[in-house]
Amino acid sequence: MTSSFPPPEDLAIRLHDFSEVEDREALAALADESPLILTDVFADAVQKLIDTGLKMGNYDAAEALRQRLDALKEIRAMKTYQRQDALARAVIAFVQAEDDEAARQTYAAHRNQLDSDAAAKMLTEDFDAEDNKAYSHLRRRAALLQQLRSE
């Protein structure tokens, strides 16, 4: 997401619009209408409003903004996912499969993307493991991908 600073009046207008949305669909429509809503600058501004509301004892308004911000974060994640190409989506699905059998099914469903050097490279080079468990999981998935590609 972009982090350049919008004109203050644009930010103020969109913060007002954001605070008035009634539901997730309206929030998604607002995000489609104004890309500013999807920026880190906007999320930071909302967080500052939440913090100010809490300091002033306006807990209901702060909570309402927090709920909208959580929904906005989910919308941002979904839009990011939708922008990923087919290869990235296939590799992510393969990595996130519940178990080896589900990973095998994912491979079968996305063989055109996963049976490639690009998929193997993405799996071994583009994923970061936060801990030993995640690292082991990625290594096992890479080995499984190699096995499936050689069958």
Image (cartoon, rainbow, N blue to C red):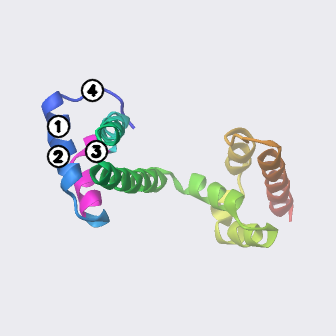
Q: Earlier in the sequence, mark 4 or mark 1?
A: 4
Q: Residues within 10 Å of mark 3 (few under 14, many from 20)?
A: many
Contact between marks 3 and 1 (CB within 8 A): the answer is no
Which three-letter amino acid code belongs to the residue tagged 4? Phe
The residue carrying mark 2 is 16
The residue carrying mark 1 is 12
- Left or right: 22 in relation to 106: left
Q: CA distance from mark 1 to mark 2?
A: 6 Å
Label 3 residue SS: helix
Q: Earlier in the sequence, mark 3 or mark 1?
A: 1
Residue at (33%, 44%) from the top-left corner?
A: 38
Tell me the mark number nearer the camera, choosing from 2 and 4: 2
Label 2 residue SS: helix
Q: Magenta-highlighted stretch: main secondary structure?
A: helix
Viewer-closest of 5 and 88: 5
Q: Residues within 10 Å of mark 4 (few under 14, many from 20)?
A: few
Which three-letter amino acid code belongs to the residue tagged 3? Ile
Q: CA distance from mark 2 to mark 4?
A: 17 Å
Viewer-closest of 116 and 19: 19
- Left or right: 85 in relation to 46: right
Contact between marks 2 and 3 (CB within 8 A): the answer is no
Label 4 residue SS: loop
The residue carrying mark 3 is 37
What span is colored magenta in the figure?
26-37
Q: CA distance from mark 2 to mark 3?
A: 11 Å
